[in-house]
Image: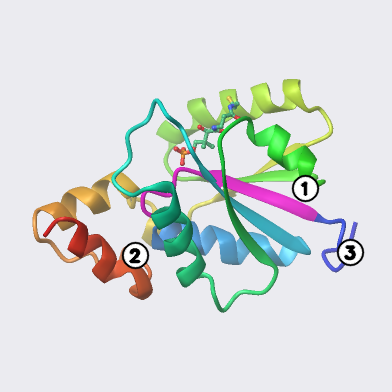
Amino acid sequence: MKSGDPKNIAVYPGSFDPVTSGHIDIIQRAKPFFYSLHILVAENPSKSTLFSIDERVEMIKSATSAEKNIIVSSFSGLVVDYARKVNAKAIVRGLRAVSDFDYEFQMATMNRRLAPDIETIFFTTRGKFFYISSSMIKSIAQNGGDISSFVPESIEQKIINKFK
Ligand code: PNS
């Protein structure tokens, strides 16, 4: 299937609490392979987040406003159910360190079991984003550190303000 085919749809799910420059890099690198990419913000009642679901959606929208055919939504439920609803053929995930691998492998295996027709595709993190995580960014911001090189410019102040 060609990337220009409107049926070539992928879903990139995550907590995005908040979205980081590493996430944006994955979005920009994955996008050329698909006609449209759904960024799916997970609503997980058992996981406490700093930002509300609406804030997380808004932050991704502002950081991706220049990108075409990016759809940002929230969901509570199974990623594969959302993927089926929008006819996605693939789930995109980013891989940083080896420590990500076990969890990601389990999740991809379970998702394939639930939906054998939907493939998980991994993008390895670019070197400069290797050590970035949403939790580290929150910790740096909370302690007054400089997060400017870790998050999109459009959301930097919003993160800082959260700790004021
Ligand atoms: O950014 P995260 O926290 O690593 O993302 C985790 C996420 C949202 C992808 C994962 O928790 C998830 O898929 N949640 C939805 C529930 C689901 O589909 N579970 C089945 C996969 S094991």
Q: Which mark is residue 151?
A: 2
Eye-nearest disc, 2 or 1? 1
Q: Residue at x 39, y 58 (%)?
A: 20
Q: Residues within 10 Å of mark 3 (few under 14, many from 20)?
A: few
Q: Amino acid type of disc 1?
A: Val
Indicate the amino acid at tag 3: Asp
- Of mark 3 and mark 2, the one earlier in the sequence is 3
Using the rendered image of the protein, determine whether residue 148 is visible from the camera's viewpoint: no
Callout in the foreground (1, 3) = 1
Q: Position of residue 121 (x, y in %)?
A: 68, 44
Q: Would you say residue 41 sits in the magenta stretch?
A: no
Kind of element beneath mark 2:
loop
Q: Look at the image and give the residue range highlighted in magenta.
A: 9-18
The x, y position of residue 161, in whole percent, is 19, 64
Residue 122, quarter of the rendered image: top right
* Residue displayed at 43% across by 48% down: 53
Disc 1: which residue: 86
Q: Residue furthest bottom?
A: 66
| 112 on left or right of 143 | right
**Magenta residue check for 12:** yes
Please name the residue shown 68% across and 58% down the image.
Answer: 37
Q: Image quadrant for the C terminus?
A: bottom left
Left or right: 156 as drawn, with respect to 43: left
Q: Is residue 64 left or right of residue 11?
A: left
Numbered circle sitting on residue 68: none
Front residue of this view, candidates 129 and 82? 82
As helix, strand or loop, the secondary structure at mark 1 comes to loop
Q: Tell me which amino acid carries mark 2.
A: Val
Q: Which residue is mark 3?
A: 5
Q: CA distance from mark 3 to mark 2?
A: 31 Å
